[in-house]
Amino acid sequence: MSSQAPVADHLPEPNETTMEPVITTDALTMHFRRCDALMGVSLEIQPGTVFALLGENGAGKTTMIRILTGFQKPTSGSCTVCGVNPLRDPQGVRRQIGYVSDAPALYDWMTVAQIGGFTASFYDDSFLPNYEASIRRYDIRPEQKIRHLSKGQRAKVALSLALAHDPSLLILDEPTSGLDPKVRRNFLESMIDRAATGRTVFLSSHQISEVERVADTIAILHHGRIRLHGPLAELRESIHEVVIDVDDPLRSIAPPPEPAEVLTEETSGRSRQLFVRHLSPEMIHALRETPGVTEVRTRIATLEEIFVACTSHRTAPAMTAAI
Amino acid sequence: MSASRKTFRDRTMIAVAMTPPIALLLFCVSAAATWKAESAKIRPMLEQSFPPELIDSPVAQAADYADRTSREHTHSSRELASAVNAINEQYHLLFEVLDEQDDLFENLDEEHPLDTYLDDYLAEAAPLLEIIKQLNLNEASIWYANEFGNPNSYSSGLINFRGLPELLRMEFRGAVRDQQTDRAMEAFRLFQGLGIGPTDQVSLRLLPLVTQSIATGIWSESELDEIVQLVKASPDLNQAWQSSIRSTTLAQAPWLLRGEVVETWRRDPTPKTFAPSLRLQWLQRQQAFSRVGGIGTFDAIKRVMKLQETFRRESGSGLDLALQIPTYKQSYSPGQSKDYLATVYTRVANERRHARTAAAVAKYKLKFGQYPVTLDDLIKVNLPASAALDPLGVPFHFESDGETCELGNAAIWFTDSRGYSGSFETREGTLSAILKQFVVLQFR
Amino acid sequence: MSTEATLTALTTTRHEASSTAWFWWKETRQLAPLVALLAIVSLLIVVINAVLGAAMGWLRLQLPHEVTMLVFPGLFATGAGPLLVGQERSQRTIDWLALLPVSSKRIASTKLLVGMIGLAVMWVFALLVILVFELGQRDTSHWTIGGQTGYSGNPFSYPVWISHSLFVLLAGFYVAWRIKNQFYSLIALIPLAFSPLIATSLVSEFANRPMAAGQLDWINLGFTLLGIVIVTPITYRAAIRTLGAAEAPSVKPLLDVSPHSPARETNDAIAPTFGTQTAPIIWQSIHSAKGMLAILIGMLLISFLAAVQLAAVDRYRGIIGLLPWLLLLAPLAVCWLGISVFKHDGASERVRFLADLGVSPGKTYFALHVVPIAILCCSLLVYGLWNLTVIHRDSVSSFAAGLPTLVTISMFVVWIYSISQWVSQFVRTLILSVILAPILALITAGWLVFAYVSLGFPIYGLILCGLAPMVATFVMMRRYMDTGDRPLTFVVGGGVAGLIVLLPIGFATAHVLSVPTMDPTLRAELLGEAQRDSGRNARYVVVPVTGFADDFAFRHDPLGDKMKDLQDHLGQYKLDPQKSVASLKSNAGADVVAHIGPWEYTRWHGNMMRARIQWRQQQDDPAWSEMAQWLDASATLLPAVRRSTLLSGQEIADRLEVLMIDTLQTDVPAERADEPAVQAATQAIGTPAGRAAARRRAVVVTWQHNFQDDRGRYLNHHLTVLEHQPPGLVGWMQPRFYDSLVTAMLEGIDAAANRSDDIGWRWELHQLHQTGGEFQTSRYGDNLRSLPAIETMTVDRVNGYGQLWGRDWEYVELKIRTQP
């Protein structure tokens, strides 16, 4: 059932050396007592890219991250992070990554400086200057106790701690929730230049606008399955929104032929809205020819629409088989 | 949250929350109600045995005592008592020698001439004896000015009670030595007049001396009859038993009615309360003891001990015990233990039977010129066989060969396993306590 | 720019410290509150013990000091594991810690090492205090295992205590790593910590005979070491497993049902509906801590069953010996029920949820309290009903006999519950509150019992002190729900503690002050008089009075020849009055003070009475001469005794004077009135004024001695009123009662002097000497005072001063007095 996305499917990025992927997961499955978090997820994330994992709340993003960081054993399947299996050597994985959870749990009785010093003692000497620079950048007073910081300030401190040792892989779980717009903007820019310097960023979020500006490749997770996986730019062109106006509401329209896949289909009165992937101009032309079609309009789908399309569970069952 | 219709879950939650406290409250309220009901029962029970004004008088015992005594006798008896005490202390050495002699059953006069000292004592005590005779004291008349009801342990100021009986005992001994039977009879009559209740103190008992005097054979037949009459006239044991219980209960009236602790030997500072059911139970137990009949017999002792054993094993289960502070069992038992009293009474009864038997033997000797062979012969001097029995209901120890005879105050040689040789199958410590002084009279 | 510099300076200086240093700093910083708490509480208990020891000699309501000190390292060991590990797990900082490049082995071992070092420090502190304060019994050596000789408050030797606390520390870490829910881990810790003791008593049960303390010591040490050997590896494994990846739940749904299919509908999905507002909160507080409430009810049940078993058996050996320990589960359960009110779902952040919904603090307070109170009421009801069936008799079982009543038990429950629910609101972390609450409850209960028993604190006061913490938490509820209660709660807490401590003291002070002291003017006047009197130092002469039968116990010699003894010594016991007063007569010039006690006076009284009776009977010259002897001797003795500055001396003088007056009035015929002896006797009889002066001087001198140089022996008459005061206050009230005694006596003396029969001073003296008695039938009452003094006076003892003052004998006019 799990199909390995063909490597050749997308053009290698210009700066991507064909090195071994940072994160690979092989049919990760995770069943909890009452829900199935992951249903066989297989991914590969190339170094030096900003990978965004999109999904609704409760889609299984956090569980995925906990498995990647070695906090959780999957029910079946395996994964490797930076070439290391987190189950076998969690410490090795955690040494190389920076992880910021959605609600960072820090020692609230420590001051900002103390927690910086405490964490720095476990890393090399470069940790503390970076940390202090970022703290100054976010203008947080170092002698303040974490207990008295606001939610946003606490998120900034967690970010600074995660970034200070310049990890090769940065895993962020809804990092910008609670950040003010100004800080959010320059945080996202820092993500872009981090990726530029060859480090990977694994971003899990449901802020479409934020992902659109930053992500290189995205994956849409819905009910524990990867609905869509691929480079953002390519995905964006490959998915079109097709609106077909028909003269008679009851007329049924045949779906476009094979290489194209219909993500979702919606009919309202005399017009039908389709989200189709791999739509070729001939298919649009053929549609216009079909009898009873008064008009066909197509345009590139925005990421948001793609996301909604992928996660609305009215997708035809065939859809899952396709990818 | 609009107060819509109460769902089933609501009712269970409120029930879970409300029922235990309400149940506990009900338990405490019923305990308080029981407390009220029980305390209401105490007074009627008291009034069955005591007049209401006696119970309500501030000090029940004082009122009870005052109207039974005469002021005039009190004045002279106070003087008499202090004088007798002084002279008795002065001659205490003489007392010790005489007491020791009684134990040895023989007369040591040959080696130790006591008569001189005895006569000095009697000479000095003669005026006191006159006053005793003139006053013809009886137990009712003497009122020792005592601050009844005043718990101050020093307040009693009761003049030492032992002086008079010891004086009369010495007088009786002197008379017997001088074989003046009228003097002896007079002393015996005065002694009975004092109406000393059954007691365990040797110095407060004359009957053993009388019995020994009978063995010496100095009494004539009429005098023997008079002695037997006097013994019969001494206070009835059942009556004494009832009155001792009565006075103990009367003294506890404040405790019974209001729970105020009547003076115990040492005041217990921890504040305590007593549930009325506990007090009612104590009162019922006192009445159970007072219903024990046949005081003075061995069965009485057994019945009393059985009662005590059941009381020891049972505790009140009244609801109002829960409101007592601080524990369920508040130990409170004024007065002497009842089995001890029963034992003493039985000893006194035995001494009386022994005296009458000795008198009968002596009368038999006077009438028939020789001692009876067995105790059954005493029927001839109209002493029924049943009167010659020791507490166990076994005839007295009696050996006689016509010329001389021996009469012991119990059937077989009693010794107590505590330090004395031999033992016997009765419960250790009971009968032997009764007959510790096993007396054997030698009739010559 | 300067701030920049300082900031960098501030932070940079720290960074070169190594990670181990930082790690240890963090762990110790987390342990600090526990160590502080234990240090404060240990000092608190030592102070309380000192106070109790001093105030109540007769009731040793104290823990032996050394056990108090030994318990604290144990408490530290209990708290260290849950605090270092359980706290981090519950606040999820463990995940962040695990993110650091630190191996889980190092995390676990560092935490354990910090715990051990802390334990070592606590041990050093405890043993230091024991050695400094000499708390242990000197006669038993505590350092040799099994070397216990004789009874010592602490059955086990120190090495066993130390190894046991180490075992408890390891067990604490094990339960903290193994069990995620903090409360369950603590509950699991109790049996684990006591397992060596349980094993030891099991061994003694099977050995079926009580074992000497030494053997128990060794067996306990053996089991403790075995425990350490077992627990260490499993603790390490539990730590690694917890710090590693969490296990995936193994259960696999039977059939692969799509998430929204009806098959998944379980009744959980149906939302519970409520009509009223309080029911949901009650429902929530039950369901939030179902497991914990079940455990606490279980603990109550276990201790109840232990009580039932103890009430049916009267010999505690072997495993039965452990039952009394199980009884301790009940107060602990009550305590932790109180803790559960403001912890778990009562904790401030959860309660905010209700605050946000606009539920009133009062309703929340009631709802949070309602479940524990329901449980407590249920258990009290069961206790009450069970006691209806129990025979409370020593013969059946000494345990059953000593059972406190329902009212007493509910009072203790109220105290423990209210104190612990206040602690649960006051202390934030569960671990500290779970350890602190029992100790504070114990101290409060001990103090209030001491106040009730020893300070005479009334019952409604006890109830007030019991409910004060409940009121405090109710008042703080609104702020607590907004988590803004921090600063004010200290103030309210201080207020509650102050109330509980000061209310009994307030009552006691009011009780003490209710007895008036002597007013200053009278005091100054008495002092002046005392100065004037102290000038004359009269010579004291003791009047030899023979005729006593010396104590039989000392003289009893069964082998001695009583006859010889009689012949030799009988003569010594004759009392010759002239010989006794010879010394007084010899220096009749100087005013000599005679000293004769009440017991000696009985002989004088008795012999004189015998002489009078003899004279009445015989009416001849020898009898008269003998009585005249006594009259003459008395005439010499009376003035000497009257001069005595002892109150008992004055009482004897009164009795002698009553005797002489009675003799002169009744036994002296008119024709012998002019005999020298009679004249001397008549002269010796004093006047009311003279007597008043002598008595006043005696009172002043006795009071002065008692007040100035504390030679209390003069005013040593035992005041019965002291027996009726709360034992703790007797010391405070004694001087005040002596003051009122002196005031009353002075009043009495004046009343006697000018023959007024006012009742005030007599009532006061009666209250002082015969508290609890009836005034009418006492010697201060009118009934007895109306009788002639000779009939009612106590001769052999003085059971109250002033019983003869102002009675008719003082004012009698002797007809036969011929000369003035």
Image (cartoon, rainbow, N blue to C red):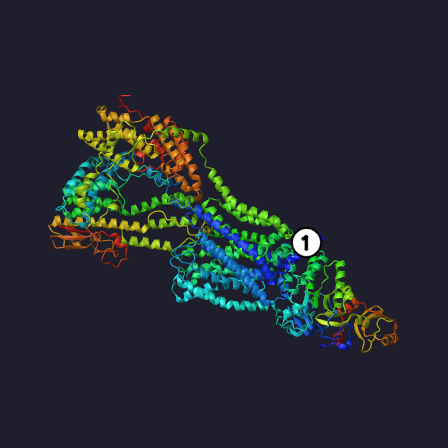
B14 displayed left or right of B272: right
The quarter of the picture where the C terminus of chain C appears is top left
Q: Nearer the viewer, residue B23 or C362?
A: C362
Q: Nearer the viewer, residue C53 or C300?
A: C53
Residue designated by label 1:
C6
Q: Position of residue A8 (x, y in %)?
A: 77, 77
Q: Nearer the viewer, residue C279 or C818?
A: C818
Residue neighbourhood size for the residue with mark 1, other residues' Cα within 10 Å, grouped as few (<14), some (14–19), many (≥20): few
Residue C558 makes an appearance in the image: yes
Given the image, what chain letter belongs to the residue carrying mark 1? C
C79 displayed left or right of B160: right
Q: Position of residue B88 (x, y in %)?
A: 23, 40
Residue furthest bottom in the image: A258
B98 displayed left or right of C153: left
Type of amino acid at the residue the image marks with label 1: Thr
- C675 to B322, vertically: above or below: above
State the image quarter where residue B11 is shown. bottom right
Residue C631 makes an appearance in the image: no
Q: Position of residue B429 (x, y in %)?
A: 28, 55
State the image quarter where residue B59 is shown. top left
